[in-house]
Amino acid sequence: MARGRPSRPRTTKRRDRHGRGLRGPLLPSSLPAARTRAERFDDLVLDAVDLLERRWAQELAGVEFAVEDVPPSDPAPWEDDAVPLGRLFPADGASPTRVVVYRRPVETRADEDDLDDLVAEVVIQQVAHLLELPPDDVDPRYGED
């Protein structure tokens, strides 16, 4: 027969080796630094769309804007072998016209300081393609540094 104390049922609460228990998040969710890169990228796209909708509200009324991580593996015929940064999907039956910005390819082509400019350029290019106008006519700031 084994000596010692009788065994107690284990509790599910875990503690670290210093007995402190589980820790919370490093930053409260109310601070901007707590947002993920994907959430910050979504905000950049929304900012670019808001600027264009002020001028082209009627033309962009039924257009959906979306962000996807990567483009599909089958490129469109006009894209050659380059990885697209965005794509326009025309209205098809019940689905509305969609402008999609691809987050990962855009992030790899720009550093943190230039990311907002590149996102705006991609959105302007896709809206220009939709409206069949040159990008400079869609937004006069297109191409400025």
Image (cartoon, rainbow, N blue to C red):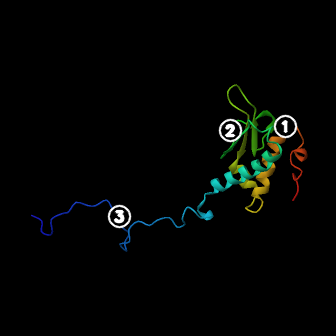
Residue at the far top in the pictured view: 93
Q: Where is mark 3, residue-wise?
A: 14
Q: CA distance from mark 2 to mark 1?
A: 26 Å
Q: Residue at x 79, y 33 (%)?
A: 77
Amino acid at circle 2: Ser
Residue at the far bottom in the pictured view: 18
Quadrant housing residue 65: top right
Q: Are marks 3 and 2 in contact (CB under 8 Å)?
A: no
Q: Where is mark 1, residue-wise?
A: 131
Circle 2: element type: loop
Which comes sooner in the sequence, label 3 or label 2? 3
Q: CA distance from mark 3 to mark 1?
A: 59 Å
**Front disc: 2 or 1:** 1
Q: Are marks 2 and 1 in contact (CB under 8 Å)?
A: no
Q: Residue at x 89, y 39 (%)?
A: 133
Q: Percent x, y for residue 75?
A: 74, 37
Query: Position of 60 compared to 25: left or right?
Result: right
The one of 69 and 42 positioned closer to us in this rendering: 42
Q: Percent x, y for residue 137?
A: 90, 45
Q: CA distance from mark 3 to mark 2?
A: 44 Å
Amino acid at circle 1: Leu
Question: Which numbered dot is residue 73?
Answer: 2
Question: Which numbered dot is residue 106?
Answer: none
Q: Percent x, y for residue 90?
A: 76, 32
Q: Quadrant of the C terminus?
A: bottom right
Circle 1: element type: helix
Query: Position of 122 compared to 31: left or right?
Result: right
Query: Position of 37 compared to 54: left or right?
Result: left
